[in-house]
């Protein structure tokens, strides 16, 4: 009996026994690919929604210049401050609660 792996499982995107030139980037890309498959297949999200979500995560990764397994709440706070104070995005477009 063959056990099927759930959609998005990392082992579906990473090949065992292969040495990657940039292991962390390969794992990150596999994570994004698996997550996008899960959003499409498991949650039935529209392609535009999936792309937007992937872009947000990729933008945060570029801002922190770090990988998800090293991310912190402080890094996220810095990114949100950057979006509002530096890029002048409205808090409602960043996911921050609106305050009067």
Image (cartoon, rainbow, N blue to C red):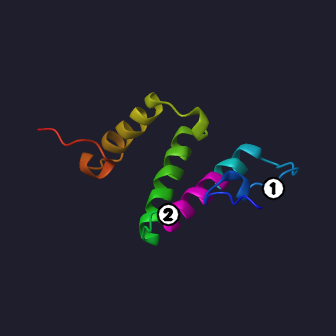
Residue on which disc 1 sits: 15
Could you tell me residue 65's position as x and y percent? 59, 40
Say what secondary structure mark 1 lies in.
loop
Q: Where does the magenta region start and end?
A: 30-41
For this orientation, the residue located farthest to the left is: 100
Q: Residue at x 84, y 51 (%)?
A: 16
Say what secondary structure mark 2 lies in.
loop
The residues tagged by marks 1 and 2 sit, at their Cα atoms, a distance apart of 23 Å
Q: Quadrant of the N terminus?
A: bottom right
Q: Is residue 98 left or right of residue 37?
A: left
State the residue in front, 86 or 40: 40
Count the labels in the image.
Answer: 2
Can see residue 41?
Answer: yes
Q: Is residue 66 left or right of residue 20?
A: left
Q: Classify residue 4 by image quadrant.
A: bottom right
Residue on which disc 2 sits: 42
Q: Residue at x 44, y 68 (%)?
A: 44
Whether the residues at callouts 1 and 2 have beta carbons within 8 Å, the answer is no
Could you tell me residue 28's position as x and y percent? 65, 49
Report if residue 29 lies within the magenta region: no
Q: Quadrant of the C terminus?
A: top left
Dot 2, how many residues are within 10 Å of its Cα: few (below 14), some (14-19), or many (20+)? few
Q: Is residue 100 left or right of residue 24?
A: left
Can see residue 13?
Answer: no
Dot 1, how many residues are within 10 Å of its Cα: few (below 14), some (14-19), or many (20+)? few
Q: Residue at x 42, y 39 (%)?
A: 79
Q: Main secondary structure of the magenta part?
A: helix
State the residue in front, 26 or 62: 26
In the image, residue 20 sits, relative to residue 82, either above or below, namely below
């Amino acid at each position: 009996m063959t056990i099927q792996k759930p959609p998005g499982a990392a082992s579906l995107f990473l090949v065992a026994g292969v040495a990657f030139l940039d292991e962390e980037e390969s794992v990150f890309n596999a994570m994004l690919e698996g997550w996008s498959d899960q959003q499409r297949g498991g949650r039935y999200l529209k392609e535009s929604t999936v792309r937007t979500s992937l872009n947000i995560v990729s933008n945060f990764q570029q801002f922190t210049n770090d990988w998800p397994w090293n991310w912190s709440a402080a890094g996220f706070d810095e990114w949100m401050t950057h979006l509002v104070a530096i890029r002048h995005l409205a808090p409602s477009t960043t996911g921050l609660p609106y305050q009067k």
